[in-house]
Amino acid sequence: MTSPRDERDQNDLERAAAETREPGEAARIRAEDDAETRARQADAGRELREAERTLRDTGRRLHADGDAAGAIERDVERTRDLTREVAERARELRADTARTADRADDITVDLERGDAPR
């Protein structure tokens, strides 16, 4: 038979053992949690680096597309200017042709009258 004192001593020993196990368990849990946190941080870091690369690449493509759009815009402006120039020269040619036709008519009339061309 155990005495009440022996039971208290045994309970104290069990309590002390439990307290010793708890900090060990808490440390293990904390270590696991820390490892999971580091893994999540590493994943997040990889994702951030990938996002940064994607942004950089997209920025380069946008810059190149902007340059290409600028070149197209300059080509369109040159084409517009050339089209205006061609249209103006066509008007001038039509006017010259009309004057030449009028002059030819005048010469024909003069020749039919027997006059010398003016």
Image (spheres, rainbow, N blue to C red):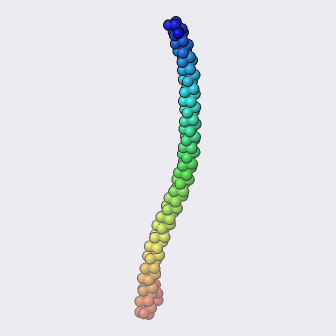
Q: Residue 116 versus residue 13: which sits nearer the camera?
A: 13
Report whether residue 1 is seen.
yes
Above or below residue 4? Residue 22 is below
Q: Residue 91 versus residue 15: which sits nearer the camera?
A: 15
Above or below residue 57? Residue 2 is above
Above or below residue 24? Residue 98 is below
Residue 56 lies, in percent from the top left, at: 56, 46
Q: What residue appears at the point 48 percent right and 68 percent down from the top-left corner?
A: 83
Residue 46 lies, in percent from the top left, at: 58, 40
Which residue lies most toward the front here?
Answer: 1
So how many labels did they put on this image? 0
Q: What residue appears at the point 45 percent right and 91 percent down from the top-left corner?
A: 111
Q: Residue 63 versus residue 56: which sits nearer the camera?
A: 56
Residue 62 lies, in percent from the top left, at: 53, 51
Q: What residue appears at the point 53 percent right and 9 percent down from the top-left corner?
A: 2
Is residue 40 shown left or right of residue 106? right
Report whether residue 81 is seen.
no
Q: What residue appears at the point 46 percent right and 81 percent down from the top-left corner?
A: 100
Residue 20 lies, in percent from the top left, at: 57, 17
Above or below residue 17? Residue 58 is below
Displayed quadrant of residue 114: bottom left
Displayed quadrant of residue 39: top right
